Amino acid sequence: MSKQTGRRRHLAGLSAWDRCAVMGVVNVTPDSFSDGGRYFDTTAAIKHGLGLVAEGADLVDVGGESTRPGATRVDEDEELRRVVPVVRGLASEGVTVSVDTMRASVAEQALVAGAALVNDVSGGLADPRMIPVVADAGAPFVVMHWRGLLAGGNVKGSYDDVVAEVVAELRARVEAVLEGGVAPDRIVVDPGLGFSKDAEHDLVLLAHLDRLLTLGHPLLVAASRKRFLGRVLAGPEAAPPPARERDAATAAVSALAAHAGAWAVRVHEVRATADAVRVARAVEGARSAERTRPTEGTR
């Protein structure tokens, strides 16, 4: 087993994959930065989720509230109306479903409907009931680095050392989640690319995923179609390409994250990333085989 594979931790309560898992995104919203409105209808959203699985997704992340900068929060009833039927429909088809929400009530009802994982971009900070709900359900929980809602733009995006500060703030949040009763083997950490971070911050974090792995929990990397990729592709002068033209760049990040030891990558377009993580695993396997092969003259 390679060094990278050896550091890829299993998450209790979910299947164990021998490679970086692929989390496909289903946005049941009219205003997502990437694909807002395309899967707003319940039937269309379920069909899309099943399509992502057919293309290679290991689990599907269902969200009913956009977290793009400047987005307005939807009310609780509307988020429930959007999310729960889609979770139920996908889970009934045997799909491993993650619910992307900052509301405890949505997480609670989604778990009852068949969700297996709660993905909260606030790490439990937006709703004080979230941690007790997750702990009582015994569900795996994604703790993302978060410095507040992005209404009006990027908030608190100043760092002296973005890697050290993100690691320290995530460690403190994980400790709070543990104190709230969530089991340590059911916690995932996420550096929160694009949340209170500019393109340089995101790239530096990607260059130091090994530091995030020192937190001792599975790592989720969610870079798909984000602004920093648009900035990289455009260069210093041109306008960034639209979100849907950043999928090749997303797959490149997925390969890098898989090689670094990420537990999963969260993406909108699955097929290219599914291929990328499998190639990364094959390279890891070849390296491992080479290291264990007897040298000439030995038996």
Image (cartoon, grey):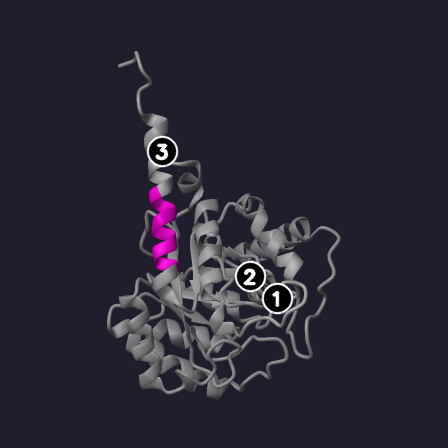
The amino acid type, in three-letter code, at marker 2 is Met
The reply to whether discs 3 and 2 touch (Cβ–Cβ < 8 Å) is no
**Residue 37 location in percent, x, y?**
45, 85
In the rendered image, the vertical position of residue 44 relative to residue 190, given as above or below:
below
**Residue 156 location in percent, x, y?**
72, 66
The amino acid type, in three-letter code, at marker 1 is Phe
Residues 113 and 230: in front is 230
The reply to whether discs 1 and 2 touch (Cβ–Cβ < 8 Å) is yes
Task: Report helix, strand or loop for mark 3.
Answer: helix
- Residue span colored magenta: 273-282
Task: Report helix, strand or loop for mark 1.
Answer: loop
Q: CA distance from mark 1 to mark 2?
A: 9 Å
> Can residue 39 be seen?
yes
> Which mark's residue is nearer the viewer, 3 or 2?
3
Q: CA distance from mark 1 to mark 3?
A: 36 Å
Task: Report helix, strand or loop for mark 2.
Answer: strand
How many residues crowd around disc 3 within 10 Å: few (fewer than 14), some, or many (20 or more)? some
The amino acid type, in three-letter code, at marker 3 is Ser
> Which quarter of the image is occupied by the N terminus?
top left
At horizontal 32% and vertical 51% (from top left) the residue drawn is 16
Read off the residue under disc 3.
Answer: 288
At horizontal 26% and vertical 14% (from top left) the residue drawn is 299
Q: Is residue 152 magenta?
A: no
Which is nearer the N-term, disc 3 or disc 2?
Answer: 2
Read off the residue under disc 2.
Answer: 144
Which is nearer the N-term, disc 1 or disc 2?
Answer: 2
Residues 238 and 183: in front is 238
> Which mark's residue is nearer the viewer, 1 or 3?
3
> Can residue 12 be seen?
no
Which disc is residue 195 wearing? 1
